Image (cartoon, helix red, strand yellow):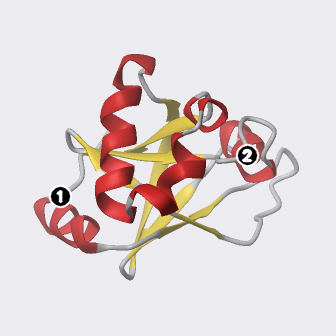
Amino acid sequence: MNPWTSDETSRIATAPALSLATEDENGTSGDPVPLGFVTVGGDICIRAYRGAQSRWYRTARRSRRPRVEIEGMERAVTVETAEPGRAEEIDAAYRSKYGSADSGPVTSRVARAATLKLVPR
């Protein structure tokens, strides 16, 4: 695993969204999905506001080679389940970044259960 570089970290901090590209079981690349995200303790966290049944979420969990694009940089990542004990911290980060009204869908119980962490490869 290669950590995010200091240049990447500073670019990520100011980005409003990222794009996640995945590959299905057949090796077919899907269209990148634009997603809101937050950084918590140096981790990039994303949530599926429709929960674990969201198409992009299921594909990302199975993808062999997910890639993330943020602010013009592209990086191969590993998709991991975020630690459940960090749910409140992640909720607070979403509220801080996107505002309480706009973050409502991603701070729901359903979305919390579909929280992923993107780890650079």
Q: Amino acid at mark 1?
A: Thr
Q: Secondary structure at mark 2?
A: loop
Which residue is at a point 39% across and 82% down the rendered structure image? 72
- Position of residue 20 relative to residue 112, above or below, is below
- Residue 16 or 107: which is nearer the viewer? 107
Residue behind mark 1:
5
Q: Amino acid at mark 2?
A: Arg
- Who's the residue at 51% across and 41% down the image? 107
Tag 1 secondary structure: loop
Task: Identify the mark at residue 50; answer none if there is no mark.
Answer: 2
Q: Position of residue 73 (x, y in %)?
A: 37, 75
Q: Considering depth in this image, is 93 or 35 the residue closer to the camera? A: 93
Mark 2 Cα-neighbour bin, 10 Å: few <14, some 14–19, many ≥20: some
Nearer the N terminus, badge 1 or badge 2?
1
Q: Quadrant of residue 86?
A: top left
Number of marks: 2
Q: How many residues crowd mark 1 within 10 Å: few (<14), some (14–19), many (20+)?
A: few
Let me know if residue 120 appears in the view.
Answer: no
Tell me residue 63's x, y (percent): 69, 44
Q: Give the answer, above or below, for where 68 lies relative to 105.
A: below
The image quarter in which residue 23 lies: bottom right
Q: Give the number of the mark in front: 1 or 2.
A: 2
Q: Residue at x 71, y 38 (%)?
A: 51
Mark 1 → mark 2, Cα distance in angstroms? 31 Å
The answer to whether residue 29 is visible is yes
- Comparing 7 with 100, the one in front is 100
